[in-house]
Amino acid sequence: MKIPNNSINATANYFKDELKSIFGASELEQIFQITFSHFFGLSKIDLILKGEEHLSESELLKIIYTIKDLKLNKPLAYILGKWEFYGLPFNVTEHTLIPRPETEELVDLILKENTGTFNLLDIGTGSGCIPISIQKNNPKATIYAIDVSEEALIVAKQNALLNNVTVDFYQLDILEYRNKNFEFPLDVIVSNPPYITLEEKKLMHNNVLDFEPHLALFIEDETPLLFYDAISDYAKVNLKIGGKLYFEINEHYGNAVKELLTNKGFKNVNIVKDINEKDRIITCNS
């Protein structure tokens, strides 16, 4: 299909016609708005007022390549290289998970429950969306973050600069922290660790399986609580008395994680449901 006169309106129609068999109407509209805002700086109002303005050939090519990638199930965040989380911009690559709305709920809870001066460690930081969002919204907090992936940490450091915040990043495998002498008193520990079992992997869409980093997603079926066990052991040693531990969890393992934490002596262990009424967050105190 040739785009008539290269107008914004015609290009918008082309974009939607090419993708309407893949996405539902609501999702497609969201993808369209994000794409045209990212490439051309066009708001919803601009799309109405400037609909007859023309795009250049290079601008049209961006749309054509985006359509091709979307048809290959590539997530829009990876096509654009950026994604919004908690109202902030974040670079994302194939080495980092795409920040998700459920994790925004985790950040929101931490900010509501912890005000003023405190120090926090994010374990398995990925793009850095959790610690950066917390630091941006509470500059009094001192924030540390670790990840096993050097490539992810490069992106996280870029995102700290992008959002003009200070976060201390370290490369560390939490499963081996005892060998690295990485211990210091903390007020808050948070983690969104790998929690999808290989059995559940079979049920996932290709746009996740083919593009997002498996290192940050999946855990062996035999050890679904591996990271919760290791991180809670770390928290027992490093959380101050009364300090808070926050986990994002697999909805199917809420009670199992709660039992694990209770058996380790944590107090006030509480499961929090997300906006979709799924068990998504666990909080407790040392």
Image (cartoon, rainbow, N blue to C red):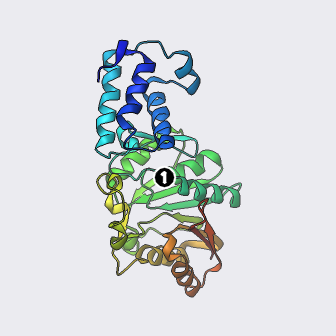
Residue at the (29%, 20%) spot, across then down: 2
Residue at the (61%, 66%) spot, across then down: 273
Q: How many marks?
A: 1
Relative to the observer, which residue lies in front, 285 or 271? 271
Amino acid type, label 1: Asp
The image quarter containing residue 91 is top left
> What percent of the width, then of the height, locates residue 7?
41, 15
Residue at the (49%, 32%) spot, across then down: 33
Q: Is residue 138 rendered to the left or right of residue 198?
A: right
> Is residue 250 shown above or below 34?
below
Helix, strand, or loop for circle 1? strand
> Is residue 61 shown above or below 71?
above
The image quarter containing residue 240 is bottom right
Residue at the (57%, 46%) spot, across then down: 86
> What percent of the width, then of the height, locates residue 1?
29, 24
- Say which quadrant the C terminus sits in: bottom right
> What percent of the width, then of the height, locates residue 101?
54, 52
Would residue 67 be seen by someone viewing this image from the given angle?
yes
Q: Is residue 68 rendered to the left or right of residue 247?
A: left
Other-residue count near label 1 (Cα within 10 Å), few / some / many at <14 / 14–19 / ≥20: few
Relative to the observer, which residue lies in front, 109 or 272? 272
> What percent of the width, then of the height, locates residue 141?
63, 53
Q: Which residue is mark 1?
A: 168
> Is residue 38 shown above or below 187?
above
Q: Is residue 9 rendered to the left or right of residue 2?
A: right
The image quarter containing residue 277 is bottom right
Would residue 139 be seen by someone viewing this image from the given angle?
no
